[in-house]
Amino acid sequence: MLLVLDVGNTNTSLGVYASGQLLRHWRLTTARARTVDEYGVHARNLFQLAGIDFQEITAVAISSVVPPLNYTLKRMAEVYFNRTPLFIDHTTETGLKILYEPPSDVGADRLVDAVAARHFYGAPCIVVDFGTATTFNAINADGEYLGGAITPGIAISSDVLFERAARLPRVEIKRPASVIGTSTVGAIQSGLYYGYVGLVDGILRRMKDELGGKARVIATGGLASLIATGSELIETVDDTLTLEGLRLIYEHTTANDVQRETQQ
């Protein structure tokens, strides 16, 4: 079995694969202060509740945009699963050509999303990942990673508005019934939701034009489903895209290692 972890600034997603099939997946809060033992015990408890034997884990693959947690997760994999994890970065053999400059600046999550989107949806395509930041990732018709755009996530926008405007309340992020808010809460929700949908579609429209207009648009991340209901350009919501990308990259890397050993 393969354990995959996608570590974001706000949430961490975990998934367990057996024979290429996703058995279970979970989304947890990213806790930077959590220790090796806390991560290990937490993972084992999740496995136990799901009826999965942690001793059957034979490999661990991780994409992380939180460097301070990398050592903790490495030790967790070694101590609790007796495995050295594969950390994804620009040097990993993903089969994806990176045209971004410098390649080392591309977040692991962006690469993983791109690999999965190209595999499942073809190229050209655009992946929108709704996380702490919202990232737009463009793959051209040749299947190469071009780059994209990065914007503050909608939750950050909401938090800043609440913190900086003394008389405005914190509100639930949701799609309001109408654009014209008839209360302060409704007005804020309208501005956050429809303003963000406009931002997303505005960037996507320009990116599609630069890619020739035929690129498919795939959304993933915590608020993907919510934003997609108001977007004119998001075609598909894939909640497990990043986990699938981790699996694909692990399988690609393993196959290359086996090939090299055979040739030696």
Image (spheres, rainbow, N blue to C red):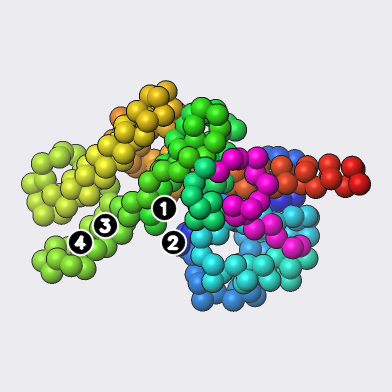
Residue at 78% x, 55% y: name it: 58
If you read the primary sequence from the N terminus, does the residue marked by circle 3 or circle 1 appear first?
1
The label number, if any, that marks residue 74 in the structure image: none
Look at the numbered discs 3 and 4 and tell me whether their residues touch, using CB distance below 8 Å: yes
At label 3, counting other C-alpha atoms closer than 10 Å, the crowd grade (few under 14, some 14-19, many 20 or more) is: few
- Mark earlier in primary sequence (3, 2): 2
**Amino acid carrying mark 3 in the image:** Ser
In the image, 32: left or right of 189? right
SS at circle 3: helix
Question: What residue would you read off at disc 1?
Answer: 131
Q: Residue at x 48, y 40 (%)?
A: 146
Mark 2 to mark 4 CA distance (whole Å):
19 Å
- Element at badge 2? loop
Distance between mark 4 and mark 1 Cα atoms = 18 Å
Give neighbour class at mark 1: few <14, some 14-19, many 20+ (Cα, 10 Å). Answer: many
Label 4 belongs to which residue? 161
Mark 3 — residue?
A: 157
Contact between labelled residues 2 and 1, with CB atoms less than 8 Å apart:
yes
Nearest to N terminus: mark 2 or mark 4:
2
Mark 1 vs mark 2, CA separation in Å: 7 Å
